[in-house]
Amino acid sequence: MSEFKNVTLTREAKIYFNGKVTSRTIVFADDTVKTLGIMMTGDYTFETEKPEMMEILSGQLTYCLKESDNWIDVKGGESFNVPRDSSFDLKVTELTDYCCSYID
C-alpha cells in the first residue's frame, strides 16, 4: 500500500542519532499506529515496547534481534518482525526509507 487515507499525521518529526534517523507518526481511524521514516547509513540500536513489523520501502540494511547472533540482510520490498519488550541492531548500508507498524 503506497497511500494511506483518512489518517492523522504528526507534523513534527522524531529525530534520533543526531538526525541520521527520522520518523513521523500516523494514526488510523481504528487507532492503528505506524511511523514513516528515513535512516541514513550507520549503526543503530532500537528498543521496542510493542511488537513491530519493519517494512523496508527502499534501501538496504542488516539487522540482528536481541539475544541473537544472526545478522540478516533486508532490502527494499522486504520486511522483518521484532517482538515486544526487545531490541534490535541495524547496520544501514544505504539510505533506507521505512514504514514501521506497531502490532497490538
Image (cartoon, rainbow, N blue to C red):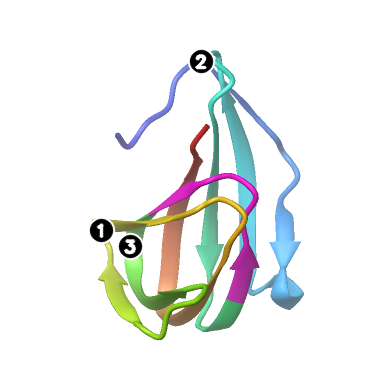
Above or below residue 100? Residue 70 is: below
Q: Residue at x 64, y 60 (%)?
A: 22
Q: Which residue is mark 1?
A: 78
Q: Earlier in the sequence, mark 1 or mark 3?
A: 3
Q: Residue at x 61, y 75 (%)?
A: 45
Q: Which residue is mark 3?
A: 58
Left or right position of 93 against 14: left
Q: Earlier in the sequence, mark 2 or mark 1?
A: 2
Q: Position of residue 90 (x, y in %)?
A: 49, 77
Extreme residue in the left direction? 77
Q: Residue at x 62, y 55 (%)?
A: 85
Crowding around mark 1 (Cα neighbors within 10 Å: few <14, some 14 to 19, many 20+) is few
Q: Position of residue 87 (x, y in %)?
A: 58, 67
- SS type, badge 3: strand
Which residue occupies the foreground of this view, 89 or 24? 89
Q: Amino acid at mark 2?
A: Asn
The rendered magenta stretch, by its main secondary structure, is classed as strand
Q: Amino acid at mark 3?
A: Ser
Disc marking residue 6: 2
Left or right position of 39 against 64: right
Which residue occupies the foreground of this view, 23 or 73? 73
Q: Position of residue 78 (x, y in %)?
A: 25, 58
Mark-to-mark CA distance, 2 and 1:
25 Å
Tag 2–tag 1 contact (CB < 8 Å): no
Crowding around mark 3 (Cα neighbors within 10 Å: few <14, some 14 to 19, many 20+) is some
Q: Amino acid at mark 1?
A: Glu
Residues rendered magenta in the picture: 45-54
Mark-to-mark CA distance, 3 and 2:
24 Å
Mark-to-mark CA distance, 1 and 3:
9 Å
Q: Position of residue 39 (x, y in %)?
A: 53, 69
Tag 1–tag 3 contact (CB < 8 Å): no
